[in-house]
Every structure is written in structure tokens, then in C-alpha cells.
Amino acid sequence: MTRMIAVTTALASLTLIAAGPAPQVASPGGDPSAERQCFRPQTVRNYRTDHDTTAYVRDLRGQVFELQTAGCRGLSASRTLGISPQTGGTACVGEAVTVATAGPSTMGENNSVCAARVTRKLTEAEIEALPSRLRP
């Protein structure tokens, strides 16, 4: 009996694998056929900031996302940028994230932890249209 359950479980697993990848998650409140636009913070390879209110981050897949803050002291001067999603391991368009900035400073004056929102994923044309100083 135990052997039959193991074989049945293995066959069910193979059926699920053969069925292909899981469907993409639809974006909330939008077109149900639209794919959510997300990135994993640990895959961010570069970023640029526009004053202390906007950050553009590029992930390992080459996608660029815009993050907006209400004003995050030290964002424009930061050497490092940490991004922590409020839920799960990914940061998606429309969701809140926590942004941590660090340095340069003599007494930590440019180190901040701020609330931000992932506002959009930029298209290739939008990335190219950014001034070079803002293009990650």
C-alpha cells in the first residue's frame, strides 16, 4: 500500500512538471492577463538617485524599476542602498518597501531608513530617455 502511494505521488509530480510552468500572477486591480512586475532586492546590481526622493534600480535581468520616497535623507549621497519588501521576497510595482541608505558621512548623518514605493518598471525607451546621470 505504501509503495502504491509513493508511485501515485511520483506520477502526480511528473504530471505537474509536464504541464509546464505555473501561470503568471495577475497584477492586482488591473488587467487579469497582465503579469506582475517585480524584482528581487538581492539581485539589484546598480542604482542611481535623483535627489532624495527617487531611486532607479537595475536588477540582474536588466530590468529598471523606479522607487519613490517622500524624502529620504542621504539617498542622493548614499554609497549603498538596501531594499526590503514589506511582504515576501520580491518588490513589485505598487508595493511599499523599506529603503536603507549608508554613507558617506562622518557621524552617520547620511544613514537613513525610509519608506518607499515601487512606482513602475521602465521600458527600454524610458531607460534610454533618462539622463545618463540617472541611468543605472
Image (tube, grey):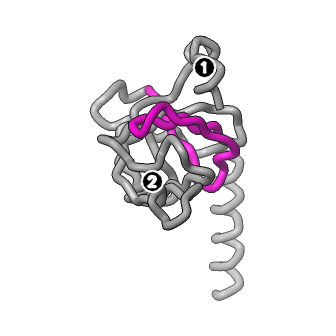
Residue 29 percent across, percent down from the top left: 28, 33
In the image, 34 versus 5, the foreground residue is 34
Residue lying at 35% horizontally and 38% vertically, measured from the top left:
94
Badge 1 local density, few (<14 within 10 Å), some, or many (20+)? Answer: some
Q: Nearer the viewer, residue 38 or 57?
A: 57
64 or 18: nearer the eye? 64
Question: In the rendered image, which residue does mark 1 sit on?
Answer: 127
Q: Residue 51 carries which label?
A: none
Where residue 33 appears, x then y in whole percent?
43, 26
Q: Mark 2 points at which residue?
A: 99
Residue type for callout 1 = Ile
Residue found 39% across the figure and 33% down from its top: 119
In the rendered structure, the answer to whether residue 129 lies left or right of residue 32 reads right
Furthest-bottom residue in this view: 2
Q: Please, what is the three-letter code of the amino acid marked with disc 2?
A: Val
Q: Distance between the residues labelled 1 and 2?
A: 22 Å
**Magenta stretch, residue numbers:** 34-58
Q: Position of residue 45 (x, y in %)?
A: 70, 45
User: What element does badge 2 sit on?
Assistant: strand
Q: Is residue 91 magenta?
A: no
